[in-house]
Structures are given as C-alpha cells and as structure tokens.
Image (cartoon, grey):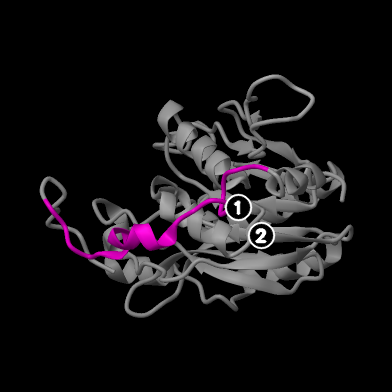
Amino acid sequence: MNDFTIALLQLLPEQTIEGNLQKGIHFCRKAKEMGADLALFPEMWSVGYTIPENMEQLKKLSLPSDSAFIRSFGSLAKELSMAVGITFLEQYDPLPRNSLCLFDRFGAQKFLYAKVHTCDFGDEKRLTPGNEFFVTDLDTGQGTIKTGAMICYDREFPESARILMLKGAEIILVPNACPMEINRLSQLRARAYENMVGIATVNYPKGKPDCNGHSSAFDGIAYRPSEPGSRDTLIIEAGEQEEIYLAKFPIDELRKYRGREVHGNAYRRPKQYQLLISEEKQPPFFRDDYRGQ
C-alpha cells in the first residue's frame, strides 16, 4: 500500500450549523482535489465547539446521528470517493455527546465515537461521556487500514491510544479544540511512539478562542534500519492560520516496522497491570467534579 493521505481541515467555524455544513462541504471538495484519502474535522465542528450553559439551548444545538447534517457528509464521501471524519454535538439522553462519525469512501458509516474523557472540570460537564473506543477496517482503494479515533482530552490518558492499539489500530484520528503546545504535542508524539501507530490531530486555527492551530501528524516510526539512532516521527506540524494540511502516512513501512520493533503489544505483561483497572483513588487526586465511569 502506498501513502495514506489525511487532510487536516484546520478551519474557523461559521456562526450557524448550516454555515458549518456548507463550509465543511467546500473544504472536503478542496481536500479531494489535493489528493486526500480522508478528510478530518476539528472537534465538534457542527457547532464550532460551542457548549452553552443553558441546557435547553445546548440540547437545541445537538443533532441526531442520522440528521441531514451528518447524512450530507456521508453522501459527500460517496460522491468524492474519500473517507470523511465529521464531528458534531450529538443529540443524546440525558445530555448531548461530543462525537465523531467516520464515513468510508463508499459513504458507509464505519463507527460513531463519543468522547470518553470529557473535560468534566469545564464546560463538558454538561455532556454525556462515551463508553467505548472503536477500530474499523477502512477501505482505501489500495487495501484496508485499521483506523480508530480519540478526541482531544482522550490524548491525556495513555489508556486511550493503548486500547486502540490493542484493538488493532494502525492510524488514530484525533479531532481537537484547545491550545496545542509543546506538552500536548509531546503527548501525541509519545502515543505514536509507544504504540507504533500513526496519529493525525486536527485543531481549530488561531481566531477560534482557546485554539491556536498547530494540527499535527506523527507516523510512529522511531527507527529505520538505514538510519543511525532514532528519528523524529513528526510528519507535519501546521502553523496557526486557517488551511488544509496534508499528512501522508507510509503504511507499508509502518506495518513492517510494527512487525519487527519492541513497542506496542510485543513485550507487554498484562498480568502485572491489574492496578490499572482499580477504581480506588488516593490523595492528591480527589476531585469534587469527578463523575466516575
């Protein structure tokens, strides 16, 4: 398989859901013209990552997973023969969810992922957390790629990417809406390195409050037989401005690397990790706003 190209749609949102629909369609078409195999939106694109304090307003902005907004991107994926990862505020009971719907190049929904690690210390306390990570076989026209997803704050927990790797993920899609700086970029670099996976993250550009662009992609290939020492796995780091950034993942090389190197699931000892599933907390990690599972 040749390179798998992901278009990171680092875009400023419009003021309405309809505006985001039309802008999203326009930039998906541009991504296809640029040679993308998949177009990925930043976090909760339908509302430009807006979470009103008023519950009625929040629920009014949410959309069913089979809404015209979502179906439009499924139809577009089929028309363009390009996978699309569309993000939205999903209608859900008792509270909306922060979700990603992945369509393949035939327009078929491959999974609907809801953010597991909601930021309960902030506005996302008004959202329902997801409860599962998904990996799917994504048909690229050259073959299939095992593709998973996590959203923004999920990145902060090594378990998110680890579970996706254990489920077979080769590429992890990461919609985002926060300032991307050295430590958050380092987390993504680490998740790619320790799991031997490609990671594609797309953020909102400067101009969206609390965001600064710097969408990024890491190929997870830390060592090449032809090169001495280790290498930077960074494929691309965007600037701050609104733009489409292309990340090309060398899938064949990644697969060969995963077949010989020592990370991922090669030498793990799961029986020694039982403490990881304990629900007990100790100081200093008590938080009044913690919602549990």
In the drawing, what numbered circle is on residue 241?
none
Q: Quadrant of the C terminus?
A: bottom left
In the displayed structure, would residue 130 be above or below residue 31? below
Asked if the residue under mark 1 is in contact with the one under mark 2, i.e. CB atoms within 8 Å, the reply is yes
**Image position of 274 (left or right of 104):** left
Question: Real-space Cα distance between discs 2 and 1?
Answer: 6 Å
Residue at which label 2 appears: 147
Please state which of residues 41 and 231 is positioned toward the viewer in this rendering: 231
Residue type at tag 2: Thr
Q: Tell me which segment is drawn in magenta.
A: 261-282
Residue at which label 1 appears: 172
In the displayed structure, would residue 177 be above or below residue 239? below
By secondary structure, the bulk of the magenta-drawn segment is best described as loop
Residue 161 drawn at (x, y percent): 50, 53
**Image position of 219 (left or right of 76):** left
Give the image quarter of residue 219.
top right
Count of numbered circles on the image: 2
Please state which of residues 161 and 6 is positioned toward the viewer in this rendering: 161
Residue type at tag 1: Ile
Query: Magenta includes 33?
Result: no
Give the image quarter of residue 222.
top right
Residue 6 drawn at (x, y percent): 72, 46
- Could you tell me which residue is drawn at 56 percent across and 71 percent down? 112
